Amino acid sequence: MRDFTLSAYKTLLTTLKSRGYQFLTFEQFLTTTKGGKQIILRHDVDDLPINSLNTALLEKELGIRSSYYFRIVKQSNHPEIIRTIADLNHEIGYHYEDLALAKGDKELALKHFIENLTYFRQYYPVRTICMHGSPMTAWDNRTLWDNYKYTDYGVIGEPYFETDFSKFLYLTDTGRRWNGAKVSIRDKVRSSSKQEYRTTFDIVENIDELPDQIMITTHPQRWENNLFPWMKELVFQNIKNQIKRLIVKN
């Protein structure tokens, strides 16, 4: 079986469910008291929003809610898909990159952040945000909050600030692999958990060694059953990884 297909994703979710994990949106995690085995399931919609609709439909079929963070740029921002995913009872959040788009001008970035947050709230009462890594720029979008407070704008949380990664295992498919720290510019955390996996099937095969608390982040444009777009994403990501590896090294 090929990795990074909807079939592989379904295998991952059903295996986790079979082990008693409860899936939460990030908003649910921040606003409800949940004990036992839990997974915060988050998706960064960087590109190809139709793929996000496909994962959202699969999750709905499995009785799972998750968080979808959309960028303001046209390759992510697709109104009909955003509305449909919200109607499927998933959380919609803002995948902000305003500081990078404003080329480091924090005053302008905040102005755009407020405008864009208002825009996404026409689809869902957005209460959580998540930074876009903007790996090909010099700006870390999170540093906008060195000068301002997102809580002033009705936002209750941002995963990189509100999650205690000393307690949560962080699994992200950055780089189209689950151990992509060497090719990640900003999608990385300090975690006390030492588990590391290369493929989705590695996670499934070692499911019983996972801790009780996990955050999973996927980029749905990577998850594709059809061979041609699957190959296109594979080739593109391999090229991108080489560039990012050089950036990290230097």
Image (spheres, helix red, strand yellow):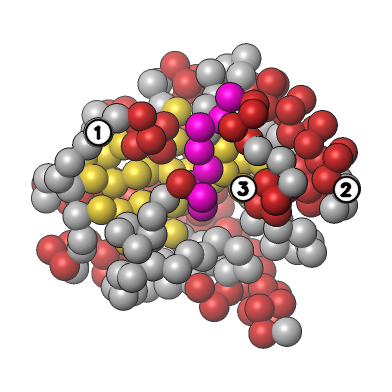
Q: Are marks 1 and 3 in contact (CB under 8 Å)?
A: no
| Identity of the residue drawn at 32% across and 57% down | 168
Q: Disc 3 residue type?
A: Met
Query: Magenta span: helix, strand or loop, mainly?
Result: loop
The CA span between labels 1 and 3 is 25 Å
Q: Specify whether residue 158 is painted magenta.
A: yes
Q: Quadrant of residue 203?
A: bottom left
Which mark sits nearer the N-terminus, 1 or 2? Answer: 1
Residue under pointer 2: 105
Q: Secondary structure at mark 3?
A: strand
Q: From the viewer's perspective, is residue 16 above or below residue 77?
A: below
Closer to viewer: mark 2 or mark 3: 2
The CA span between labels 2 and 3 is 16 Å
The CA span between labels 1 and 2 is 38 Å
Residue 178 at x, y percent in the picture:
41, 67
Q: Nearer the viewer, residue 13 or 172?
A: 172
Residue under pointer 3: 131
The quarter of the rendered structure image containing the N terminus is bottom left
Residue 29 at x, y percent in the picture:
34, 37
Residue 195 at x, y percent in the picture:
29, 73
Q: Report the span colored magenta.
A: 154-161
Q: Quadrant of residue 171?
A: bottom left
